[in-house]
């Protein structure tokens, strides 16, 4: 069955990939690839109204809608038309065997009028509802807890000022609600009410979208190698995933076991190089632990300080994580750091061992960690530590003016297939893309060699801005196109935050 999927009009690139990921989560392997899309007549791709065919019954549609952040509702479409007369004709032609089970005397119902691109007054809504007398409703009206909800969804003839390219003509949809979004997560987990956040803490809506892309659910092990204040892991823990954070341990004996005994590793997921962020926070009542306590989520058993450039996993340990979800440091708001220090890395001083009496409060030396090296280490870690079929979800920065033809835009690895890339525009010059990759094969020495070759090729193509400092310079330094007359720039139609 084709359903009408109505999206919230935000984060447009993320909408379809989220639905396909949730279809994979609830429908099983291959269900995401089986999702089909098409647009209603006279509608642009970025319209909130899409038609979707899912590989299952309406229970799958309800599960997707209830878990999604960007789906407003999924509906069994009874009819559509450019006018209410056309809508009536379409509803009358809809098969009775599909309609009558929801119109019985024992049932209760409610009709809701909603719109996009216009405002419908309360009086107009009542008149619209009264016009559906040709539908043989026999049940009773229940406005609070109806058994069945029916929606009238109307779009108007809107222009470019409403956030979309012009639509040729208005459309009216009528359908039965199959599933609706639960948006209470956003006010509950909003950053402004969270006890412990940092300057780069992930927005809660984006964190939940990343958790959906990573297929976080009960029994899954999710790892964040750049955990910071733990925003992504809070989202994963809400969906039931087991959580791990690295840098500090309340029980040092257990921490040692975690790196040796795979059966215990299920209790933790996350890492960060800055021990002050993950161990101390802003005091005993304002740290990573307090974020989990605030939302009554199972707290991580331990926190380990770790470096993505020098991962702490014992030799031979691999394929233990179901997903790696992270936001790597790419040098715009915060630069990446790795262990070693400049003098140590240049060979000026030899490697040293921290004395036992100084281990508790010692802060190791660090050196700049370029984006190229960071991405390479992340792909190498994911190829080794993810199970086959596991997902790698991470943000990757983009210069929007860099449209080199024939050059691969995103990092590649022979272990992974790119599932989706979703752009979030941050400025005229700079955006970031959420990449979702699935591991399609085991990690071997041959795969490692091929991964190194692909990384070198990619690094050469993007050398001008992937190294330390260049991306920051490209984003914040004046550019020639910024000096164009304001009249020229303002005359271009604005759409989705970018010029077209």
Image (cartoon, rainbow, N blue to C red):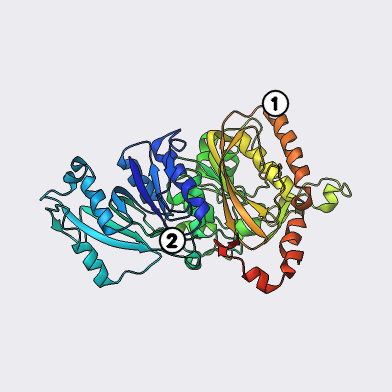
Residue farthest to the right, as pictured: 348
Q: Where does the C terminus fall, quadrant-wise?
A: bottom right
Q: Position of residue 233 (x, y in %)?
A: 52, 51
- The quarter of the picture where the N terminus appears is top left
Q: Nearer the viewer, residue 94 or 70?
A: 94
Q: Is residue 401 left or right of residue 320?
A: right
Which numbered tag is attached to residue 186?
2
Q: CA distance from mark 2 to mark 1?
A: 44 Å
Which residue corresponds to the image point at 53% horizontal and 41% vertical from the top-left?
A: 323
Side of 233 relative to 357 (left or right):
left
Label 1 Cα crowd, 10 Å radius (few <14 / some 14-19 / many 20+):
few
Work out whether residue 10 can be spotted: yes
Q: Position of residue 317 (x, y in %)?
A: 61, 32
> At 69% from the left edge and 57% from the top edge, which residue is drawn?
361
Place of residue 116 in the rendered image (x, y in percent of width and height, measured from the top left)? 39, 62
Q: Which mark is residue 446?
A: 1
Q: Secondary structure at mark 2?
A: helix
Out of 328 and 315, give the one closest to the viewer.
328
10 Å crowding of disc 2: few (<14), some (14-19), many (20+): some
Residue name at image x 19 percent, y 40 percent: 97
Residue 468's image quarter? bottom right
Task: Compare marks 2 and 1 and give the one earlier in the sequence.
Answer: 2
Please name whichever residue, 80 or 175, is drawn nearer the observer in this view of the structure. Answer: 80
């Amino acid at each position: 069955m084709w359903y009408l999927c109505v999206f919230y009009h935000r984060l447009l690139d993320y909408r379809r990939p989220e639905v396909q990921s949730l279809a994979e989560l609830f429908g099983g392997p291959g269900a995401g690839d089986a999702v089909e899309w098409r647009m209603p007549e006279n509608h642009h791709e970025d319209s909130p109204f899409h038609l979707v065919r899912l590989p299952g019954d309406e229970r799958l549609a309800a599960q997707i809608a209830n878990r999604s952040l960007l789906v407003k509702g999924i509906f069994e479409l009874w009819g559509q038309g450019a006018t209410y007369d056309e809508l009536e004709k379409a509803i009358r032609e809809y098969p009775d065997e599909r309609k009558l089970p929801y119109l019985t005397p024992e049932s209760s119902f409610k009709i809701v009028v909603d719109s996009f691109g216009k405002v419908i007054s309360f009086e107009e809504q009542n008149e619209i509802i009264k016009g559906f007398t040709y539908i043989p409703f026999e049940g009773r009206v229940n406005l609070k807890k109806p058994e069945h909800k029916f929606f009238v969804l109307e779009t108007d003839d809107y222009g470019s000022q409403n956030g979309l390219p012009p639509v040729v003509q208005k459309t009216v949809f009528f359908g039965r609600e199959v599933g609706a979004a639960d948006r209470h997560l956003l006010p509950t987990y909003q950053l402004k009410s969270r006890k412990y956040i940092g300057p780069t803490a992930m927005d809660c809506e984006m964190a939940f979208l990343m958790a959906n892309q990573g297929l976080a659910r009960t029994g899954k092990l999710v790892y964040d190698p750049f955990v910071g204040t733990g925003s992504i892991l809070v989202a994963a823990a809400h969906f039931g995933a087991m959580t791990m954070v690295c840098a500090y341990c309340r029980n040092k004996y257990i921490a040692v076991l975690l790196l040796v005994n795979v059966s215990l590793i299920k209790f933790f997921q996350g890492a960060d190089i800055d021990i002050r962020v993950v161990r101390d926070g802003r005091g005993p009542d304002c740290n990573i632990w307090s974020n989990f306590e605030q939302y009554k989520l199972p707290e991580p058993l331990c926190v380990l300080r770790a470096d993505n450039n020098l991962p702490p996993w014992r030799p031979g340990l691999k394929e233990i994580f179901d997903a790696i979800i992270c936001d790597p440091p790419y040098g715009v708001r915060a630069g990446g750091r790795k262990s070693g220090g400049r003098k140590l890395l240049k060979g000026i001083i030899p490697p040293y061992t921290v004395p036992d009496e100084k281990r508790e409060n010692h802060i190791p030396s660090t050196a700049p960690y370029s984006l190229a090296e960071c991405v390479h280490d992340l792909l190498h870690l994911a190829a080794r530590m993810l199970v086959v079929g596991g997902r790698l979800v991470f943000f990757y920065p983009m210069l929007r003016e860099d449209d080199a033809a024939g050059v691969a835009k995103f990092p590649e690895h022979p272990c992974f297939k790119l599932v989706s890339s979703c752009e979030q525009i941050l400025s005229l010059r700079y955006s970031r893309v959420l990449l979702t990759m699935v591991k399609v094969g085991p990690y071997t020495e041959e795969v490692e060699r091929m991964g190194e070759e692909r990384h070198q090729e990619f690094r050469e193509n993007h050398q001008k801005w992937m190294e330390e400092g260049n991306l920051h310079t490209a984003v914040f330094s004046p550019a020639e196109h910024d000096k164009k007359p304001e009249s020229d720039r303002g005359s271009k139609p604005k759409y989705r935050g970018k010029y077209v």
